[in-house]
Image: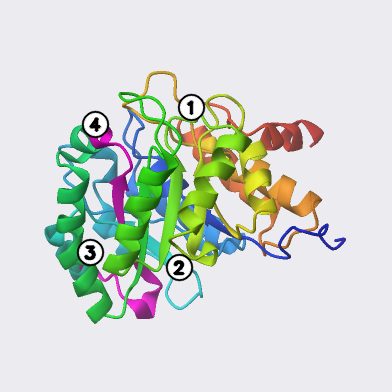
Amino acid sequence: MAAPADGLPERVTVVEVGPRDGLQNESAPVEVAAKLRLIRALAAAGLPVVEAGAFVSPKWVPQMAGTAEVVAGLPADDGVRYPVLVPNLKGYEAARAAGVSPARGGEIAVFGAASESFSRRNINCSIAESLERFAPVVARARADGLRLRGYVSCVLGCPYEGAVAPAKVAEVAAGLTALGCDEISLGDTIGVGTPTAAVAMLEAVAERVPLERLAVHFHDTYGQALANVYACLQRGVTIVDSAVAGLGGCPYAKGASGNLATEDLLYLLHGLGIATGADLNAVAAAGREISAALDRPPASKVARALAAAG
């Protein structure tokens, strides 16, 4: 593989969010065994970080039922990080009871928003209240030696408020960092961003949070996800979220499509000479299997092209 062009990173960490963010909005239940096959396949394909699930109420997020069983079945000591989302201290305690630990690649994630309206509708509290809610979770996780990831949603647009000011995104990201989050994922939840808007947002956040601690997380509603990633790579981003087979979507935004497909992201990165450690063909195979279980083709264009090529 040729070296990347000047201005591009030599290596990118791909954070696979399909098993959690991708599956949580599915209408039909996905069995624990199928989730575990997916997670194991993605880890075996060389992806260094694979979201395993969420310790949330099954009443509100039915697809995340069984996360404790998923955690119990995760490979041990394979060098892969397996973040789980927790909304509050109760969720954190459930995660720890299920076996989430530093020794087994455990990692904790909390989920906030840059939009007051989205925060209230999605997690039933204001942005300020969400940070207060996360504080004891972060404190306990730090004391237990667990790595922490903070998600900021609606960084480029909100289904209720429209455009979101970059300064507001920076404020929330800085708040999560001040609490103790090691990494901040900046999510274009409804997929409305363009490269110019993405870079403006990223630069505003980077003034308050070190760039090396920032990840980008784009949905592909308007087909701009890869362009947005490329623009952010040029600005020094080295962590990118994606979901195998393009799984996911936003239930609060009509028409919002899934996450950027991991297969499409890997094809771009490898074509640019950027190392990821992941095997594209193995990831595509995992995507085909979960898509078959969901009774639909992968949303990834690369996955479809690979399948057509035999």
In front of the other: label 4 or label 2?
Answer: 4
Q: Position of residue 31 (x, y in %)?
A: 34, 43
Residue type, mark 3 in image: Ala
Q: Which residue is mark 3?
A: 95
Picture quadrant of residue 250: top left
Q: Is residue 42 positioned above or below 231 on the image?
A: below
Residue 65 picture location, percent across and down: 23, 46
- The quadrant the N terminus occupies is bottom right
- Earlier-in-chain disc, 3 versus 4: 3
Residue under numbered circle 2: 81
Q: CA distance from mark 3 to mark 1?
A: 29 Å
- Look at the numbered disc 1 and give the secondary structure of its residue: loop
Mark found first going from the N terminus, 3 or 1: 3
User: Which residue is nearer to you in this view: 31 or 232?
Assistant: 232
Which region of the structure is painted magenta?
98-118
Instruction: Name the residue located 66 percent from the left edge and 60 percent from the top edge.
Output: 278
Residue designated by label 1 = 257
Question: Which of the two marks, 3 or 1, is nearer to us in this view?
Answer: 1
Query: Pointer 3 and pointer 4: residues touching (CB < 8 Å)?
Result: no
Q: Residue at x 53, y 32 (%)?
A: 193
- Which disc number belongs to residue 117? 4
Real-space Cα distance between discs 4 and 2?
A: 32 Å
Q: Residue at x 87, y 61 (%)?
A: 2
**Which one is closest to the eye, mark 1 or mark 2?**
1
Tell whether position 116 is magenta: yes
